[in-house]
Image (tube, grey):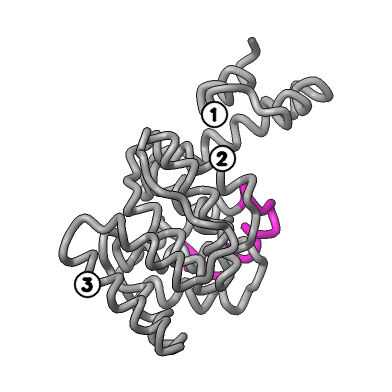
Amino acid sequence: MTTGLAYFKKVYGAVPGWVQKMHDYNPAMLDHYTALRGAAMAPGALSVKEKDILLVGINAARYYARSMVYHTKGAVDGGATLEELIEYLLVAFNYGGERALQLGLQSFEYALELTNTDADKISHEASAIDIVRYYSTFASTEKSEAYFEKLLSFLTANDENALKQELLNSNVVSTQMKFILMTGIYTATLQNKETDDWAKKSRDVGVVEAELAELGYICLLTAGIPSWFELSDALIQK
């Protein structure tokens, strides 16, 4: 098996069809892509787990289930907990709304399988409030329970502004990582002004430039070189 095929078999447990076809049509292309992915996903300012789980949230927000599910495996293999995954999937609401939460259930159900967790399922057409209530049953600490109580109270009151703010507050996932996720969502959806705005907000809460740069690398993987154009505009020149 060639290096590229072996790499992706290790990552996903089997060679995905899109990888096999790239190899079949142009092995050199797969070699170059494998090298690019390996560099972008290598540990650095962001860990491998953080990169995978950021890509889960980014792709939930932009309704791209295939990539979301692929990176769910990487996140779980890297040590992400169900509670961490839930919060990244919840933050996706701040861009993609209820539909993002519904799509994210595919990621969560796959994570349940990967972790051999026996749990009830919920309809993929459930409302946002029902999905948040469902996720609240996985809270393992009093802090997390209080976090979900706030989310549910804002949803019940239809206070979307307060909800969006609370979603960005630290719980099992730090505020810094949530701001990185929001920056990544706007980067991957090629929204230049918003990318710049969220990069500035991220710096304000303690995110460093190297983390933003590495976010750009993984956005390039999931959304192509134009996404690097967007984030590179927001980076401070060395």
Amino acid under label 3? Ala
Give the labeled residue for mark 3: 146
Numbered marks: total: 3
Q: CA distance from mark 2 to mark 1?
A: 7 Å
State the separation of the CA atoms marked 3 and 1. 36 Å
Mark 3, secondary structure of its residue: helix
Stretch of the chain drawn in magenta: 220-238
- Residue 36, x across and y down, in percent: 60, 37
Q: Quadrant of residue 112?
A: top left
Residue toward you, 193 or 189: 189
- Residue 126 appears left or right of 145: right
Q: Determine if the magenta segment contains residue 235.
A: yes
What is the quadrant of the N terminus in the image? top right
Circle on res. 12: 1
Disc with the residue nearer the chain's start (3 vs 2)? 2
- Looking at the image, the residue that sits furthest to the top is 1
Circle 1 residues within 10 Å: few <14, some 14–19, many ≥20:
some
Residue pointed to by mark 2: 70
Q: Residue at x 23, y 67 (%)?
A: 145
Say whether marks 2 and 1 touch (CB < 8 Å).
yes
Residue 234 screen position, x and y as percent: 54, 70
- Amino acid at dot 1: Tyr
- Taking the spot 22% from the left edge, 72% from the top edge, the residue there is 146
Name the quadrant containing residue 77.
Answer: top left
Amino acid found under the numbered disc labelled 2: Tyr
SS category of the residue bearing label 1: helix
